[in-house]
Image (spheres, rainbow, N blue to C red):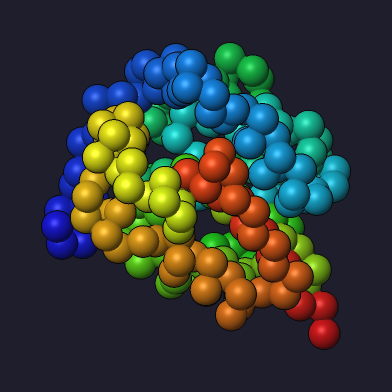
Amino acid sequence: MNTQSEKVNVVDTYRKRARNYDFTANLYYLIGFREWAYRKRAVAALNLSPGDTVVELGCGTGLNFALLQKAVGSTGKIIGVDLTDAMLSQARKRVAEQGWNNVELIQSDAAQYAFPPQVDGILSTFALSLVPEPDKVIESGAAALRPGKRWVVLDLKMPSNWLRHLTPIILPIVRPFAVTEALIDRQPWTIIRQTMEDQLSHVQFDNLYLGFAFMISGQRATG
C-alpha cells in the first residue's frame, strides 16, 4: 500500500467511525486495554502548566481535550489537528457543548502541518503510526517546541517477543483503527522511537499492554 492509499484508507475508516468513535474505543476495555488510563498518563507526561499552548496531532473527536483543559486551564490554548473532517465535526460538537473557547481545530495532514513556533507541548495518541512518514512530523514538531518542553506519543505496536506471532489474531481487533498488514510491516514505532531519540533529549520509552502499545516522551534540549 503506497502513501496515498494509506491516507485514503485512514480518511475513509475514520469518516465511517466518527459518530460512534468514542463508544467503540471504550469497547477495548473488554480485552483489558486501559485506553483512558494510558491517555491520562500521556497528558501527564507533557508536564504542562496553566497558560501553556499544546498541539494535539490526530485529535479525533477530542477525547483528550478535557485532560488537556485541566492541564493548561482557561488561559492556555489547545490546537487540535486532524486529517478527517468527520472526526473534527465531532470534536467541534464536544468543544461547543463544553463551552471551551480556547480550542482551535485545524484540518490538515500531520505531515504537512506547520507548527506554530514556541509551543509548550505536542501530543499524539493512537494516530502518529498511521502517518506514512512520522519521522518528518517529529522533526518538525521538535523544532517548534520551546526549550525544555515535551513531545509525547502514545500508540500501538507489535511486541518484539514471541507475542508478535499473534499478529493474525490481533489484526482483526485493531483493523477498525485503520491498522493494516502494510502498516505493521512498516513498523512505524521503530521510526518514531529512533527519530525521538535523534531529535530530543531525556527520551523515555515504555512498553504497555504486553508490548502491544507504547508511550514515548522527550523534551527539547535547553542548551
- The image shows residue 175, relative to residue 143, as above or below, that is above
Residue positioned 59% across, 44% down in the render? 208
Q: Closer to the camera, 22 or 51?
A: 22
Residue name at image x 15 percent, y 62 percent: 2
On-image quarter of the C terminus: bottom right
- In the displayed structure, does residue 102 sit left or right of residue 112? right
Residue at image x 52%, y 73%? 194
Q: Is 73 displayed left or right of 215 in the figure?
A: right
Residue 128 seen in this snapshot? no
**Where is residue 13 shown, x and y percent of the image?**
24, 34
Where residue 62 sits in the image (x, y, percent)?
A: 53, 31
Residue 51: x percent and y percent? 82, 46
Question: In this orientation, which residue lies closer to the viewer: 10 or 107?
Answer: 10
Residue at left offset 37%, top offset 50%: 164
Label count reads 0
Q: Quadrant of the N terminus?
A: bottom left
Q: Quadrant of residue 20?
A: top left
